[in-house]
Image (cartoon, grey):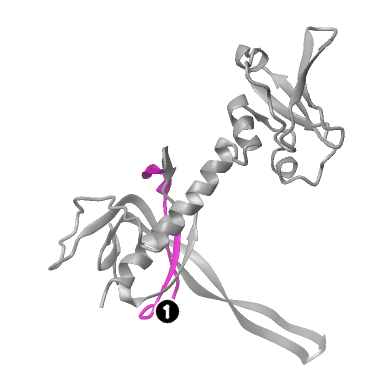
Amino acid sequence: MSDEIIKSQEPIICPICSQTMTHIEKKKLLGKLQMYICRNIDCLTKLVVKKDALLLSETENINSDVWQTYKQKKLTLREWKKIAKGGMSDEEQSKQDRITILERFRRGEIIFKLADEVPIILKKNEEPFLYLPNIELHEDRMIRDRVGGAVRVMKGVYVGGSRGESHPERRHVDTGELILTNKRLVFVGSRKSVDIDLRKILSIDPYSDGIALSRSNKKNIEWFIGNLGLVKIETNIEDREYKFNFDGLFLKYMIEDLASKLE
């Protein structure tokens, strides 16, 4: 059991109504149950001591945003103090900061240059920004199937017939390296290479492990898929330092920002 929690010199404040909480100790068959209960009879929030954390177990104010976000969650005393002052838990703060970083990144206020050298010949005034190995190139292709068939209803008489139906199917084309510069997105594989002018890109759909891309001079959608999380984004907000996993959303925003700067 954490001495920090039980022997806290300053009173523990209710994270829901900001009133002072009272320490309660109850004997159990095996050990003791220790908790803090809010003195506000309209609140009666309970924080149960769980080793080095406090679990938000009950409250009368079930419509509270704090209860909806943190019910039955174990957090440190430091985190509960932050929440009582209008802050949030470390996990929620990290989520919010990631959204903030992505938004600043999308607006071009933050620039991540994640490559200094790349295995392609750069053109005049071309700079590398990102290098990703072991990326799979997939393409959506239309597949035509034959369905149905003629049925014999009597001697010499048949009805119906087969017909063709088309549907898209994603196929793995090659595995190689993906390079993003301030002008191009380049895929270099053992069997196929792709050179995409950023100005030709029409849309990008982001995923946790890659992107699906549509461009003006290509009929089929191209997918660039791989373990993007091997690349880390290191940054900070105020005094909080973060190392985020790179993903398709970061890649989408990088491409869009670089494309917007081209004439």
Front in this rendered view, residue 107 or 221: 107
Q: Is residue 13 above or below residue 88?
A: above
Dot 1: few (<14), some (14–19), or many (≥20) neighbours within 10 Å? few
Determine the residue positioned at 51% across, 75% down: 142
Q: Amino acid at mark 1?
A: Lys
Left or right of residue 168: residue 47: right
Estimate the x, y position of residue 93 in percent, counting from the top left: 54, 42
Above or below residue 145? Residue 97 is above
Q: Is residue 209 visible?
A: no
Q: Is residue 258 magenta?
A: no
User: Furthest residue to the bottom?
Assistant: 157
Across and down, in percent, residue 50 comes to: 69, 20
In the picture of the structure, the residue carrying the numbered disc 1 is: 219
Q: Identify which residue, 34 or 229, lies in the foreground.
A: 34
Residue drawn at x 75%, y 25% is: 21
Give the residue at x 76% y 89%. Answer: 158
Q: Residue 243 lies in what quarter of the image?
A: top left
Q: Which residue range is magenta in the image?
A: 211-237
Identify the element where label 1 is drawn.
Answer: loop
What is the quadrant of the N terminus in the image? top right
User: What is the total number of numbered labels drawn onto the structure image?
Assistant: 1
